[in-house]
Image: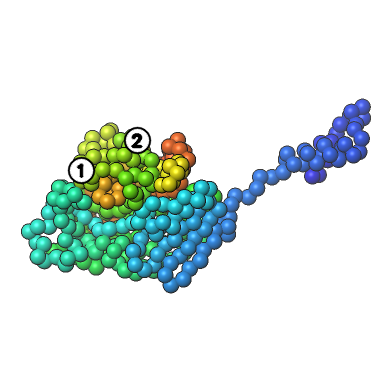
Amino acid sequence: MNFAFYRCALLPHSHRIPPILLLFVCSLVALNVAPAADPPSADAIRVEEDAEEIRIETNALKATIRKKGYVSGIAGGTFVDKKTGQADLGFGLDIVDWVMAPGSDQTYRDQLPRRMVYETGNPWHGDDPKRCMDGPQICTEAEELSPKVIRGDGFVAVEQEFAYTVAAPGRKPGSVWKQRIVFLPDARYVLSCDEVTLVEGGEELFLRTDLPGHIKHKQGDTFSEIYLSYHGAIPSSEFAGEDFAPQAKFHYRRPADASQIPDRMIRAYRTRDAKTGEQGPWLAGMTLDPTDVYEGWCHQRGYVCMIQEIGGRDYSAGDKIRAAYAIGWFDSIDEMNAVYDQHRGSRSFSVDGGVLSRTKE
């Protein structure tokens, strides 16, 4: 205000204006030079916690993270866009399974606990032989996790982990999975990352996740289209008929030629009202370094199954399989691309010391 008055007082006498008008003009100038508002604070993010779950609400989102039952990631049907009221359509977002590798477990299946057996040659897993190396499947078998809430400078994060308790024959159990989900006060998306620190290395190991998550529907009634950055737009009618196996359609496998890897790795679906057909927002899961994606499925098996596998490289003991994501609500593909480019190249997010930082290595 003092600055505004100083500018007005410098007017030449012949240009002086009446006191009442002078006060009005100075007030307007004061408004124009007022300092910018402080960035949104993490204090605006509300957190409620009990023995069963953690509930988080920002200015833009609501979400629940379960401690018991079907765990890891954000619980299905709880990720709500406050702008539109739309919730996710599946069983959860960034849900985590096993550490796996190519090749069949057929020759030693009798030595495996049932929860480690991986059957192929069927419509839900397809024909490519794969096997579980570190288990059990976290989402269905861990049963209980102990996530912790971390408040930092402009964010709230939830961090959770699980040490795998079983392994393939000749392999030591104990590899540790960690996940961080970061909520920002005004963003319609979260930042997330998964990493597994391996007790034993191996060839072409990968971590299986659901990203963004599956889609419950009846003849394509709850969504209008799917967008895969490596394929393009797919109408919901493609999923309204009979089930088909993962490799039959819309399948992604990381090309051996690095120049052929997509510039962005975005997998999204556009919601719609099952009764009225009215279009809703897009829900996208974006892997921020596309080279981290080993394989991706988008197929019909009673619901649209959107599996993503990260890693697929040769690792030594102590190495990490990891990837980072942006998961959330968007009004357009252009908006997805803009957010992707903002966080492009991230492979992990750290919240050490209350400071959000990213790793690109």
From the viewer's side, name the closer residue of 197 and 88: 88
Q: Farthest residue to the top: give it.
A: 14
Identity of the amino acid at label 2?
Ala
Residue 247's mark? 1
Label 1 element class: loop
Q: Is residue 225 visible?
A: yes
Distance from the alpha carbon under mark 1 to that under mark 2 = 18 Å
From the viewer's side, name the closer residue of 50 and 178: 50
Relative side of 172 to 291, left or right: left
Image coordinates of residue 10 in percent, x first then y, are 85, 34
For disc 1, the neighbor class at 10 Å (few under 14, some 14 to 19, many from 20) is some
For disc 2, the neighbor class at 10 Å (few under 14, some 14 to 19, many from 20) is few
Image coordinates of residue 218 in percent, x first then y, are 33, 48
Residue at 50% over, 53% down? 61
From the viewer's side, name the closer residue of 25 and 201: 25
Residue at 28% over, 33% down? 259
Where residue 166 sits, quadrant-wise, is bottom left
| Picture layout, residue 354 above or below residue 361 | below
Q: Circle 2 is placed at which residue position? A: 233
